[in-house]
Image (cartoon, rainbow, N blue to C red):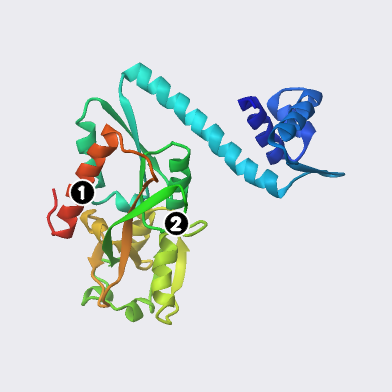
């Protein structure tokens, strides 16, 4: 089996049509048809069901498509890293993160890693689910998120639980005392990020739903900065992780919540069963120190 067979298969699976796939690959249809037949013979299972209106993946074909994409992504990442290493003579260490964890000590970790001249640090803004997929194909070496995702190839470590606070318009009635979840539910809410879950919006809205409270989400936005801009415009409040308090914003006050144990996890994700190289050992050492600083109330 050659890589071209996987590329051909993915193109056919995405197009569900041999003619369109051949055009996409800039090859004639007959050799593409032969290549798919050879692949099915090599794998030993039927990957497509031929129908009058096109092709349909079998159950085995759907599984093979997922694996083929991961293999091709892994090859692409390997080639990119190889070229980068050859050019700079450095080890590439890639970090995935959700934006809401980048307002605390993660920048300190990146800064300290960059002090090692043998390392080139790459950052990728990815949702937690995307981080798991990126770990499996080698696009990143470690990820920082907030969602628990079960995957046999990835291990997740709870670093700490971070309090959730309310970002409210400066001088608003909600700033007179720490607001309760019930008090907040009576005001318009701005939720972030929008898009398919699970995400931080699901976490925050779930806090209301589990208490039998209805919340009026007037706007969903894609990023924290936009959410805070709307708060400063007096459109409503939003819930944010505590470390966002360190991001000063005119027109926004940050308030602790009156309810107890309102928090969100900070989770590190790594490939399971992989012996850490020198870069990962250094990252783990720095991370352990920063987490200790967090848990004891000390910041670098």
In this rendered view, identify the residue nearer to me: 248 or 180: 180
Mark 1: few, some, or many residues within 10 Å (few <14, many ≥20)? few
Residue at 41%, 22% in the rendered image: 82
Tell me which corner region of the image, top left, top right, bottom left or bottom right, holds residue 113: top left
Residue contact at pointers 1 and 2, CB within 8 angstroms: no
Q: Which residue is mark 2?
A: 149
In this rendered view, identify the residue nearer to me: 183 or 161: 161
From this viewpoint, which residue is outermost toward the right? 52
| Residue 174 in picture, x, y percent from top left | 27, 75
Q: Is residue 108 visible?
A: no
Element at badge 2? loop
Is 135 on the left or on the right of 23, as rendered?
left
Element at badge 1? helix
Q: Quadrant of the N terminus?
A: top right
Residue at 38%, 75% in the rendered image: 187
Q: How many marks?
A: 2
Mark 2: few, some, or many residues within 10 Å (few <14, many ≥20)? some
| Residue 61 in picture, x, y percent from top left | 69, 44
Q: Which residue is mark 1?
A: 288
Q: Is residue 230 visible?
A: yes
Residue at 23%, 73% in the rendered image: 175
Residue 199 vertical position relative to residue 46 in the rendered view, above or below: below
Residue 253 vertical position relative to residue 207 in the rendered view, above or below: above
Residue at 28%, 62% in the rendered image: 161
Q: CA distance from mark 1 to mark 2?
A: 22 Å
Is 197 on the left or on the right of 140, as rendered?
right
Tell me which corner region of the image, top left, top right, bottom left or bottom right, holds residue 118: top left
| Residue 56 in picture, x, y percent from top left | 76, 46
Image mark for residue 95: none
In this rendered view, identify the residue nearer to me: 226 or 158: 158
Of pointers 1 and 2, the one earlier in the residue sequence:
2
């Amino acid at each position: 089996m050659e890589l071209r067979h996987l590329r051909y298969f993915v193109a056919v699976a995405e197009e569900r049509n041999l003619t369109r796939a051949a055009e996409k690959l800039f090859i004639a249809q007959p050799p593409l048809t032969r290549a798919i037949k050879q692949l099915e013979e090599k794998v030993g299972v039927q990957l497509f069901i031929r129908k009058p209106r096109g092709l349909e993946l079998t159950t085995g074909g759907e599984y093979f498509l997922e694996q083929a994409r991961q293999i091709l992504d892994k090859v692409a990442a390997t080639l990119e890293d190889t070229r980068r290493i050859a050019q700079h003579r450095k080890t590439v260490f890639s970090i995935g993160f959700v934006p809401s964890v980048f307002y605390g000590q993660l920048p300190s970790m990146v800064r300290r890693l960059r002090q090692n001249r043998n390392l080139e640090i790459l950052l990728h803004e990815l949702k937690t689910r995307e981080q798991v997929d990126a770990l499996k194909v080698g696009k990143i070496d470690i990820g920082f998120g907030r969602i628990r995702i079960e995957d046999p190839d990835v291990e997740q470590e709870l670093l700490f639980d971070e309090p959730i606070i309310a970002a409210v318009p400066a001088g608003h009635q909600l700033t007179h005392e720490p607001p309760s979840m019930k008090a907040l539910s009576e005001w318009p809410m701005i939720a972030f990020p929008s898009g398919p879950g699970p995400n931080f919006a699901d976490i925050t809205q779930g806090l209301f739903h589990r208490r039998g409270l209805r919340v009026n989400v007037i706007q969903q936005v894609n990023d924290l900065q936009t959410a805070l801009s709307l708060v400063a415009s007096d459109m409503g409040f939003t819930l944010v992780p505590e470390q966002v308090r360190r991001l000063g914003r005119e027109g926004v006050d940050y308030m602790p919540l009156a309810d107890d144990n309102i928090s969100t996890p900070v989770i590190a994700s790594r490939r399971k069963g992989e012996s850490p190289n020198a870069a990962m050992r250094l990252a783990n050492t720095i991370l352990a120190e920063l987490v200790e600083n967090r848990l004891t109330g000390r910041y670098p």
